[in-house]
Image (spheres, helix red, strand yellow):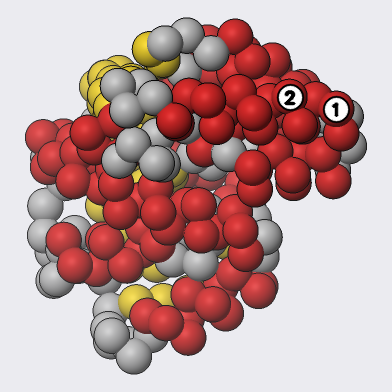
């Protein structure tokens, strides 16, 4: 868990500038009440606090340990406008029509029933409030140069393992339809591109990094011989000073309809 959280922290540091630009383009404004679903240890929470200094933020996650990590680090920073809540995102228990913005980053591909999650977000939003979902879709992972054939195998194994736990790493393509079924309007779908310049050469392909592959082997997702072979492929890629990675994140926005 600690290694995964560190990977997430590093990723947020590399990509947040463009993610924030997308939020601003969608109309997220300082002073709005914000609910972050699946906040984990608070790496995005921290960025939201900085970007929106007059906003009250509720950070929700169903892992008590991660919430405790975030609370210990961030509560002293803004105790008057930051609340932590332990609950499942699909059944938050929060009051209806409480938030101007619900933000879910890389959460929808983890849950078994994303429509339930979208409907819960709709419930807690004020009329006219906005849900913003940032997600992946392994079918739109991006490109590498030179090509790394082993990458497709890693992504396929991870996707299969996630599906076995009820999630789906191809959920990005479903977002527009999910939000429509949940009752949102003004739905918009966009993409954010990140490349080696944004992420840094050493961090540009963590899927073939030794720490990530070791965790997959320990979890039984791949064999030891595959771990060794794919680790070597990642090392060869990173040894090339001209190696290049382009990644895509999908961003879907929906609004809660105003009352008639």
SS state under label 1: helix
Report the side of 240 relative to 119 (left or right): left
SS state under label 2: helix
Position of the N terminus by quadrant? bottom right
**According to the image, label 1 marks what residue?**
225
Res 187 quadrant in image: top left
Going 27% across and 83% down the picture, which residue do you hit? 78
Front residue (pair 65, 17):
17
Going 39% across and 47% down the picture, which residue do you hit? 11
Q: Residues within 10 Å of mark 1 (few under 14, many from 20)?
A: few
Res 68 quadrant in image: bottom right
| Image coordinates for residue 256, horizontal then vertical, percent | 32, 35
- Spatial CA distance of label 1 from label 2 is 6 Å
Dot 1 and dot 2 residues touching (CB under 8 Å): yes
Going 62% across and 64% down the picture, which residue do you hit? 2
Going 74% across and 44% down the picture, which residue do you hit? 214
**According to the image, label 2 marks what residue?**
229
Identify whether 133 is placed above or below 187.
below
Identify whether 35 is placed above or below 198.
below
Report the side of 7 relative to 45 (left or right): right
């Amino acid at each position: 868990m600690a290694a995964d959280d560190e990977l997430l922290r590093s990723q947020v540091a590399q990509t947040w500038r463009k993610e924030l630009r997308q939020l601003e383009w969608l109309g997220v404004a300082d002073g709005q009440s914000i609910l972050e679903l699946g906040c984990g240890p608070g790496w995005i929470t921290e960025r939201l606090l900085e970007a929106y200094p007059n906003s009250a933020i509720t950070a929700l996650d169903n892992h008590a340990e991660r919430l405790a990590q975030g609370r210990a680090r961030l509560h002293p920073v803004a105790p008057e406008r930051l609340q932590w809540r332990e609950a499942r995102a699909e059944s938050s228990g929060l009051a209806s029509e409480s938030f101007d913005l619900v933000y879910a980053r890389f959460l929808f591909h983890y849950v078994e029933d994303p429509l339930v999650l979208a409907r819960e977000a709709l419930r807690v939003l004020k009329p006219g409030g906005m849900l913003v979902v940032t997600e992946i879709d392994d079918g739109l992972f991006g490109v590498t140069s030179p090509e790394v054939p082993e990458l497709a195998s890693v992504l396929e194994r991870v996707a299969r393992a996630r599906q076995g736990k009820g999630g789906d790493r191809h959920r990005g393509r479903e977002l527009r339809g999910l939000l429509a079924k949940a009752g949102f309007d003004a739905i918009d779908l966009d993409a954010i591109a990140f490349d080696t310049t944004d992420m840094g050469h050493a961090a540009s392909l963590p899927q073939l990094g030794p720490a990530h592959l070791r965790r997959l082997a320990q979890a039984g997702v791949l064999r030891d011989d595959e771990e060794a072979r794919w680790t070597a492929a990642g090392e060869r890629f990173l040894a090339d000073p001209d190696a290049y990675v382009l990644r895509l994140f999908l961003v879907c926005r929906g609004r809660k309809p105003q009352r008639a």
